[in-house]
Amino acid sequence: RRYHFSSFLSPKLNESRGKMADLVSPYMHWKDLAETIKPGDLIECRRCHSSSSGGGIYQHWAVYMGIVNGVHKVIHYSNDALNDSARRFGISIEISGNVEVQWATLEQVANGCAVRKNNSHDNKQEPRSPEEIIEMAKQKLGESEYNLVTNNCEHFANYCRYGRKRSGQVQTTAQASAGVFGIFAAVVVIGGVCAMLFSKSPQSSKQSTSKSVTNKPV
């Protein structure tokens, strides 16, 4: 008899895993995602050069608005001045030029790269209703207050759904930077302590030598 790994997990853990699977889909082609997402869902776009784990320069985010005039539409923070190649590989997509909240198609946002639904914060905070999310996104159209650290595309998407600006990418980067700084600081401190322990001043060394010569038996 074969046992699945999940059979050894507690019922609560299995339930938690199942709920998260409902909130966050695997990465897939935008056409496949379009068959399952609903208005108000958050869309996370993985740039093509990213790793299978979702790494890369960054992930782009958008709010799914549903089918408008027969087309799957989103609203997101972006810069239309960039060409498809730059957009696909995540090169300054939102950092330079005329960056503002605007309409786009799901296909345009994906731009040949994998996308997924990511409503992961639903398990921590009650989201707004789909109608409220859509209305909030529309109210932000034309906003041009983009800031990489405090108001990027992920901040925008989360604000529309939860009423709170948050960016896991910014938080992860900050934690990584703090870790590197902490290691550097520790190395400096340890190096300083070692220098104090294993070094002697010339005067101290000279006094020690003089004392040993003076006390030498005749």
Image (cartoon, helix red, strand yellow):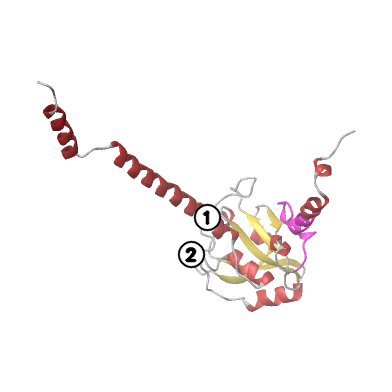
**Secondary element type, mark 1:** helix
Quarter of the image with the C terminus is: top left
Identify which amino acid the numbered label 2 is placed on: Ser
Q: Of the residues tagged 2 and 1, which is closer to the observer? A: 1
> What's drawn in magenta, residue-wise?
18-39
Quarter of the image with the N terminus is: top right
The answer to whether residue 125 is left or right of residue 85 is right
Circle 2 packing at 10 Å, graded few (<14), some (14-19), many (20+), is few
The image shows residue 77 at horizontal and vertical percentages of: 59, 68
- Residue topped by disc 1: 175
Magenta-span inclusion, residue 33 = yes
The answer to whether residue 200 is left or right of residue 7 is left
Residues 180 and 200: in front is 200
The image shows residue 144 at horizontal and vertical percentages of: 53, 74
- Residue topped by disc 2: 96
Residue 80 found in image quarter? bottom right
CA distance for labels 2 and 1: 25 Å
Residues 106 and 151: in front is 151
The image shows residue 104 at horizontal and vertical percentages of: 65, 67
